[in-house]
Each structure stands twice: as C-alpha cells, then as structure tokens.
Image (cartoon, rainbow, N blue to C red):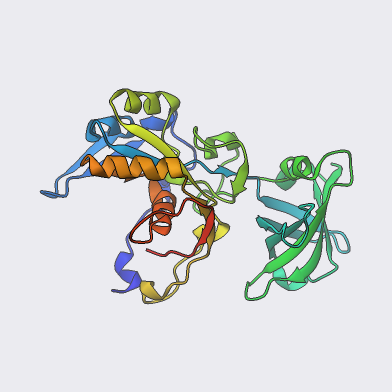
C-alpha cells in the first residue's frame, strides 16, 4: 500500500466555500456494501439508514478562535500564530500557550507580537487588545513556540483572544468570511478546546437530531480536542509510517455503559467522523473502556 494509491481528482470548483443552508440539505452518498450499489441522497435522509436501538456517538468539542494574525512590535512585519494548547503545567494562570508561529525563522525568544481587535482584517488604527511574547522554542516542532499572552486593556485574556482571533478553517476553504458559528456543530459544548471542527458533524441540525431520537436511536457524546495537525498532509510514501499528533479525549462512563448495552442487544454503534472513532478506539483496551480523560496517539 502506498499513499498515492489514495490520490483522486477533485476540481477546485467542486469544493464548497460556504455551508449548505439548512445544514442537512447537503448531499449524502450511500454505499451499500452488500452489493456495491450507490445512492445519492440528502443528509437529512440519514435517518432512513438507522435502526431503532442503534447508538450514535458524536464529538461535542467546540472550536476556539485559535488563529491569530498580528504584527511584530519591533518591525511591523505580519505574523500568524495558531494556538495549540494552554500550558497550565508551566503557568497555572493560563497565560502560556504552545503555538505554531509563522514566519518561524523571524520569531525567536523575546520577540513581541501585537494583535488588534478584528484580527485578520483589522486596520492599524484598531487598538491592540492582545500581546504575545515568544518565550522559548518547542523541541521537535517545526515552528513550535511557547508564547506568553497578556491583555493590555480591560478585557480578560480569553476575551482578548476572542476579539483578535479567528476560527482556523481547513486549507481548502479559502475565502469564507461568514458566521463563525457555521463552523461549529449544533451540539458543541460551551467550553472551547479544539483548533479545528469535527467536520463530519457539521451537517446535523437540532431538528434532525430530534427526528433521529424519535425513531428510537440513542445519541451520546464524547470529547476529543482536535489539534491543528489534523490539516497536516501525509507526506510519507508508506501511509503506515505516518506519525500522527496526540490529542486529549474523554469517553464518559455513561457512554461506555450505553455502548455495552447497545452491543449486548445486537444493535450498531455509529461514530460520527474520525475524531469520534479515535476516541472510542483509544478508550478500548481489549477488555474494558477507560473513562478517565487521557491523551491518545492512536493512528488508524
């Protein structure tokens, strides 16, 4: 097996740049594994392929405005910062973040970056709401830096990040400037932990979820904090040699019990997207599931 075995042609004009409205009006491709036939449906029709007693498991993580575009205080040069994870193990106050910065060669320890309200499209007349000081390099990470952030105004640090930041979009979404809530699932939790959305779940609407439940299908949630490396290409010729990033996940005891009940009754467990699959596969150790939050490097 080679990585280029997975290559296929996808013209740019066929990549949607704006969300479908309503969400569940997007197209759904159904492959029948028993005979290989294919159906072209709408996503709202998914309920027709679910059976009473089935269990759906979705990733409820919420995306944070993790993309910051600012200017280096000393030179005025534009730089981009992607927030990866808050390093509370090094700074209990939560001001120190592990980040990816660009251009990496110019952003060394002691460099200060200023971010303005409005972020990417902010004029130079906009006030500086957030400052980031490069503290150190992150070992083994190209472009990785430890950055200490401060909010010079009256806002809290999180408020300042929201004022300056943007939700990171996949590289194939090039010109979307609409409502950032469209890049959140309708069932996302309140706390923001992810640098990217669990995109397979973006097509569900509250009405569709309710319709699914009324058909006797159970809905449960796990949490996996999606990292920015989810956009990273597989560059190895042999895909099995690819080293994937680690992510934090949590599968609750309630979900574990629901899975056991569903399997015992002969029904299906249906994971929405790869992040939900990664959570479930990581929690399972062959005999039982681990219900405590943990870090996974599982690659499948």
Q: Is residue 42 left or right of residue 118?
A: left
Instruction: Count every numbered label the image shows and give the total.
Output: 0
Relative image position of residue 100 (x, y in whole percent): 66, 63
Relative image position of residue 98 (x, y in whole percent): 69, 61
Relative image position of residue 219 (x, y in whole percent): 38, 34
- Which quarter of the picture shows residue 263? top left
Query: Which residue occupies the foreground of this view, 112 or 172?
Result: 112
Query: Which residue occupies the foreground of this view, 268 or 117?
Result: 268
The vertical placement of 2 against 13, above or below, is below
Q: Is residue 59 left or right of residue 212?
A: right
- In the image, what residue occupies the spot 36% across and 76% down? 238
- In the image, what residue occupies the spot 32% across and 38% down? 55
Relative image position of residue 126 (x, y in whole percent): 84, 41
Query: Which residue occupies the foreground of this view, 71 or 258?
Result: 258
Q: Is residue 137 left or right of residue 191?
A: right
The answer to whether residue 154 shows anywhere in this view is: yes
Location of the C terminus (image quadrant): bottom left
Query: Which residue occupies the foreground of this view, 289 or 159?
Result: 289
The answer to whether residue 107 shows anywhere in this view is: no
- Which quarter of the picture shows residue 234? bottom left
Q: Is residue 124 left or right of residue 37?
A: right
Location of the N terminus (image quadrant): bottom left
The vertical placement of 287 against 262, above or below, is below
């Amino acid at each position: 097996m080679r990585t280029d075995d997975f290559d296929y042609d996808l013209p740019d004009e066929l990549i949607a740049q704006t969300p479908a409205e309503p969400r569940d009006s997007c197209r759904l491709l159904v492959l029948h594994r028993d005979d290989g036939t294919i159906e072209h449906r709408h996503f709202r029709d998914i309920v027709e392929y679910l059976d009473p007693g089935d269990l759906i498991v979705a990733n409820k993580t919420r995306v944070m405005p993790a993309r910051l575009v600012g200017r280096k205080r000393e030179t005025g040069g534009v730089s981009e910062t992607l927030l990866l994870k808050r390093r509370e193990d090094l700074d209990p106050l939560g001001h120190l973040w592990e980040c990816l910065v660009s251009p990496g060669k110019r952003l060394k320890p002691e460099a200060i970056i200023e971010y303005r309200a409005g972020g990417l499209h902010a004029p130079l007349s906009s006030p500086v709401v957030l400052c980031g000081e490069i503290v150190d390099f992150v070992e083994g990470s190209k472009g990785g830096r430890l950055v200490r952030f401060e909010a010079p105004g009256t806002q809290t640090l999180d408020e300042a990040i929201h004022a300056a930041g943007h939700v990171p979009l996949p590289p194939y979404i090039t010109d979307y400037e609409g409502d950032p809530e469209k890049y959140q699932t309708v069932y996302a939790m309140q706390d923001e932990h992810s640098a990217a959305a669990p995109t397979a779940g973006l097509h569900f609407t509250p009405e569709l979820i309710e319709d699914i439940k009324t058909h006797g299908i159970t809905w449960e949630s796990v949490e996996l904090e999606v990292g920015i490396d989810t956009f990273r290409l597989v560059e190895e010729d042999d895909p099995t040699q690819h080293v994937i990033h680690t992510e934090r996940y949590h599968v609750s005891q309630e979900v574990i019990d629901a899975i056991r009940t569903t399997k015992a009754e002969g029904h299906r467990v249906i994971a929405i997207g790869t992040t939900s699959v990664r959570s479930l596969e990581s929690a399972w150790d062959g005999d039982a599931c681990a219900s405590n939050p943990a870090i996974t490097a599982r690659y499948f």
